[in-house]
Image (tube, rainbow, N blue to C red):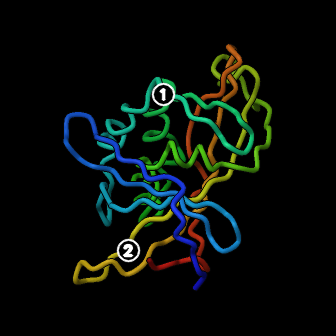
Amino acid sequence: MPYYNLYTIKIRNQMKRDQPMEKTVKIITDKDGRRLVVISRILFKGKRWICWDEVKEYLRQYVGDSYMVEDTKDTVYIGSDFPDEYAGSKYTYSLKGANAKAKANAVQGIPEMIEIAEGKHFRENSGNKHLRDAAFGWYRYDSRFALPVYNEQGMLERYNVYHVSMLIRHAKNGKYYLYDILGIKKETSNPFRF
């Protein structure tokens, strides 16, 4: 089990629209100097099924916001298409079990995952479908987040760490827009305890 330095770079509290629900997200640094977004609560539960309409509604609070990728100083905007794509993409519907739950709950740390993103790489448009909304192609960034795991008594047991690929569209107006989060993969060698 790796040792995590609990030096907190940032703690973010935010209210969900229409509900006084506190959100606590931390960015920590591990022993290798890699940053990780720690999400402390599970909002979207379900062993067999996630209500993606609720996830979509939660994501609407970010529309119109922008966040900076610290590694590249790129500004990433959240467009009005993001909630629909995130909750309704083919990739999302292909997810089952823990990965579906991870994607649903990752929404709480979207700003922080953008902030710590790294490994920017470019991909051209491969079809006519996105010529209008991603006129200058696509970028992918890597990011990481962790979610709590509770035992049968409801006590916190550990956190599972996930790697994701953040898909960013480079629009005709020259801006970068978060489009979706793909490639959710649990890092099996990195569960940790606080």
- The image shows residue 70, relative to residue 149, as above or below, that is above
Question: Of callouts 2 and 1, which one flags the residue occurring earlier in the amino acid sequence?
Answer: 1
Residue that appears at 65% across and 40% down = 69
Snapshot quadrant of residue 122? top right
Going by the numbered disc 1, the residue's amino acid type is: Asp
Taking 171 as reference, is 47 left or right?
A: left
Q: Secondary structure at mark 2?
A: strand
- The image shows residue 92, relative to residue 127, as above or below, that is below
Going by the numbered disc 2, the residue's amino acid type is: Val
- The image shows residue 188, relative to residue 34, as above or below, that is below
Residue 65 bears which disc, if any? 1
- The image shows residue 54, relative to residue 173, as above or below, that is below
x, y percent for residue 191: 52, 78
x, y percent for residue 55: 35, 43
Residue that appears at 30% across and 48% down = 51
- Looking at the rendered image, the quarter that the C terminus falls into is bottom left
From the viewer's side, name the closer residue of 131 and 107: 107
Residue 149 bears which disc, if any? 2
Q: Secondary structure at mark 1?
A: loop
Query: Which residue extends farthest top?
Result: 173
